[in-house]
Amino acid sequence: MGILMIVDDDPDDIDIFIDAAREVEPTVVCLTAQNGLDALDVISTTNTKPDFIFVDLNMPKMNGKQLIKALRNKPDFLDIKIIVYSTSKIDEDEKEVKLLGADEFITKPTSLDELCNNIARITLKDYHATVHT
């Protein structure tokens, strides 16, 4: 699976995402940022290029759409898979982010198993959900 980055201004959503990613692949490296500017800063200062970036749309300072545009304008980042990970269910948002260069759009799921399955599918990781109580 490599390196994942989650960009979201909600710390609880970040924690849940990291838990799910580690459920799918215990050795995954997870980078985090609370907005697009922080994400660009983390990538440039750590010299670590994520394989996948999961991006929320609504964040302060630099939102998800602005981050996607910034990443797609940098030749070194064209091979990073960008997945919008948002509560938005608006078709126009999905169309717009795909035009900006997002590879996929998923709505934040309501269960940990659903999130694990999405992460596994996107990262092509073999994962069989277990029931969490």
Image (cartoon, helix red, strand yellow):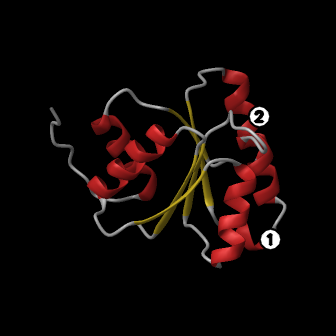
Q: Residue furthest right?
A: 73
Residue displayed at 72% across by 50% down: 36
Which label is found at residue 86?
Answer: none
Circle 2 sits in a helix, a strand or a loop, which is it?
helix
Residue displayed at 68% across by 47% down: 35
Amino acid type of the residue that numbered disc 2 sits on in the rendered structure: Glu
Amino acid type of the residue that numbered disc 1 sits on in the rendered structure: Pro
- Which residue has dot 1 on it? 75
User: Can you see residue 78?
Assistant: no
Find residue 119 and report its horizontal and vertical position in percent: 40, 49
Q: Sequence order check: which comes first, mark 2 or mark 1? A: 1
Find residue 47 and report its horizontal and vertical position in percent: 65, 79
In the shown orientation, is residue 36 left or right of residue 10? right
In front here: 104 or 69?
A: 69
Q: Residue furthest top?
A: 90
- Which residue has dot 2 on it? 96
In the rendered image, the vertical position of residue 121 relative to residue 63, given as above or below: below
In the rendered image, the vertical position of residue 39 relative to residue 87, given as above or below: below
